[in-house]
Image: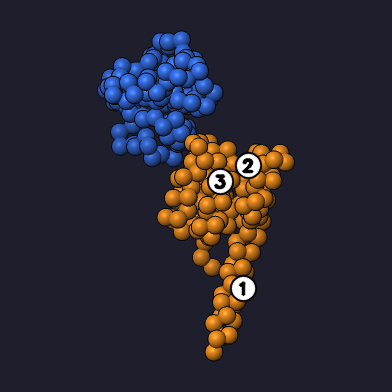
Amino acid sequence: MQLDVEETFLGMDTAVPLGIIINELASNSLKQAFPQGRKGEIRIKLCKAEENVKNKSISNITNNIGAKSSVNKNSQYSLVVSDNGLGFPEGLDFRNTDSLGLQLVNILVEQLEGTIELQKDSETTFKILFRENN
Amino acid sequence: MKKAKILVVEDQNIVALNIRNKLKNLGYTVPGTASTGEEAIRKAELTNADLVLMDIMLKGEMDGIEAAREIKNRLRIPVLYLTAYTDDETLERAKTTEPAGYISKPFKEEDLHSNIEMALHKHRAEKEAEKEAGKENEKIPE
């Protein structure tokens, strides 16, 4: 398990769903990606996202000048959970499965008003973009 | 009888999913869920729901009580509160919207079932009574 996590302060309404998302994705990797003693790595990365929505962020910053606390308000974050195991099954739509874990991940991303993407190459990577606002 | 349509309003999606599954087990249909007051009003109107299960603490500006007022007054759909709040002030505010009932969380599936059935029945009876009254009024000018 490899962690690459920036020190960040998030509100409870963001942190709790995020914790459940990480738990579900990491335990999926543990259970599915490494059968019969297969070796590998799970990586969890959390960082402030490179803004590709620059305009939005600028307007958010101006909006926040008068805000009482300026700690990480309205900035975009990226959470990446990946593993180099067997790979996500072909023909399975992660947005629409019987897996309770993935159902939870999807509805929690929706609750955070974020987005989730799956990349399937040599690694299986879930990338979640979300914003901290309150 | 056709299955009653129940709109679930809840800002925590896991709780919403749980309520939705419970309602389906009880034989109701859930045309959607909403996590803000505005969304609740829109979806109540759009899906023509028979009943709205309303949480009080919601995302956004509008809380569940304000949304319920609008849904009850304008759309005439009965609202059943389902919330963790049971303080007097909230209860007083909730009363002013004349809800079909008030269930406090955590709730039991049976409580949900019986409260929904009572609410639906009461609403149907009221509608019937209104219709009858309407007919009576029509007769008067003759």
Chain bearing tag 3 is: B
Amino acid type, residue under disc 2 in the picture: Thr
Q: The residue tagged with tag 2: helix, strand or loop?
A: strand
Image quadrant where residue A29 sits: top left
Amino acid type, residue under disc 3 in the picture: Glu
Which numbered circle lies on residue B76? none
Q: CA distance from mark 2 to mark 3?
A: 14 Å
Decide which of tag 1 and tag 3 comes sooner along the chain: 3
Q: The residue tagged with tag 1: helix, strand or loop?
A: helix
Q: CA distance from mark 1 to mark 3?
A: 27 Å
Name the residue rendered at 32%, 25% in the picture: A56
| Residue B15 pos. (x, y %) | 55, 39
Chain bearing tag 2 is: B
Which numbered circle lies on residue B66? 3
Name the residue rendered at 69%, 44% in the picture: B91
B93 and B109: which is toward the camera: B93
The colour one sees for chain B in the rendered image is orange
Decide which of tag 1 and tag 2 comes sooner along the chain: 2
Judge left or right: residue A123 versus residue B56.
left
